[in-house]
Image: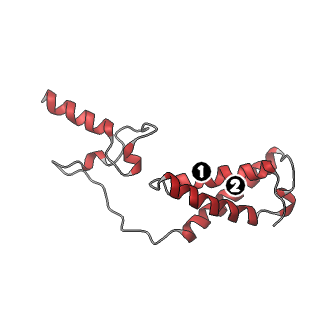
C-alpha cells in the first residue's frame, strides 16, 4: 500500500464516518468505531496512487475524491452488513407509546432518542400536556 498523505487520509476518515452514521445510525459508538477502522483501511487501499501521494488537492479533485469515497463506502457497508431484520411499519396505535418511536418534530433535536430506537422526549411531553389539558 502506498504512503498516503495526511490530507487525503483525513478526507477518507470523514467520508467513512459520515457513511457509517448515515447508514447505521442505531449502532453504538464503540461498534461504529470498530467498523469505521475497517472501512477506512478498505477505502485507503482502493485510492488511486496519484491522488494518495499529493500533499494538497485542488477543489475539483477533492470533490471527485469525496464522491468516489462516498460511493465506495456505501457499497462496502452494504456488503459487510449482516442480514437485515424484518422491517416493521410504525403506525401509531391508540393507547400505546408507538407514537413516540419517530421524532416528533420535522427537524428533530440533535440527540433525539427516537433516532436511536428509543422514545422521543418531545412527543412524550406533548402527549402529557394533552392529557393534563383534556
Vertical position of residue 126 compared to residue 78: above or below: above
In this rendering, does residue 45 appear at all?
A: yes
For the point 67% across and 59% down, the residue is 40
Residue, disc 2: 67
Vertical position of residue 124 compared to residue 92: above or below: above
Residue, disc 1: 18
Dot 1 falls on a residue whose secondary structure is helix
For the point 77% across and 62% down, the residue is 47
* x and y percentages locating residue 24 in the rendered image: 49, 57
* x and y percentages locating residue 5 in the rendered image: 82, 52
Q: How many marks?
A: 2
For the point 57% across and 59% down, the residue is 34
- Give the quadrant of residue 84: bottom left
Instruction: Report crowding for label 1: few under 14, some 14 to 19, many 20 or more residues within 10 A (C-alpha).
Output: some
In this rendering, does residue 23 appear at all?
A: no
Front residue of 50 and 93? 50
- Give the quadrant of residue 121: top left
In the visual, does 52 lie left or right of 114?
right
Instruction: Report crowding for label 2: few under 14, some 14 to 19, many 20 or more residues within 10 A (C-alpha).
Output: few
**Mark 2 touches mark 1? (CB < 8 Å):** no
Amino acid at each position: 500500500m502506498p504512503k498516503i498523505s495526511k490530507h487525503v487520509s483525513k478526507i477518507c476518515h470523514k467520508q467513512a464516518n459520515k457513511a457509517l452514521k448515515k447508514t447505521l445510525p442505531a449502532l453504538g459508538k464503540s461498534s461504529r468505531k470498530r467498523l469505521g477502522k475497517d472501512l477506512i483501511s478498505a477505502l485507503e487501499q482502493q485510492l488511486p496512487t496519484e491522488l494518495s501521494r499529493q500533499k494538497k488537492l485542488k477543489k475539483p479533485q477533492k470533490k471527485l475524491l469525496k464522491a468516489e469515497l462516498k460511493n465506495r463506502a456505501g457499497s462496502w457497508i452494504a456488503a459487510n452488513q449482516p442480514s437485515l431484520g424484518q422491517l416493521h411499519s410504525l403506525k401509531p396505535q391508540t393507547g400505546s407509546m408507538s407514537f413516540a418511536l419517530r421524532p416528533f418534530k420535522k427537524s428533530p433535536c440533535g440527540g433525539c432518542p427516537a433516532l436511536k430506537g428509543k422514545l422521543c422526549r418531545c412527543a412524550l411531553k406533548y402527549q402529557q400536556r394533552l392529557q393534563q389539558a383534556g
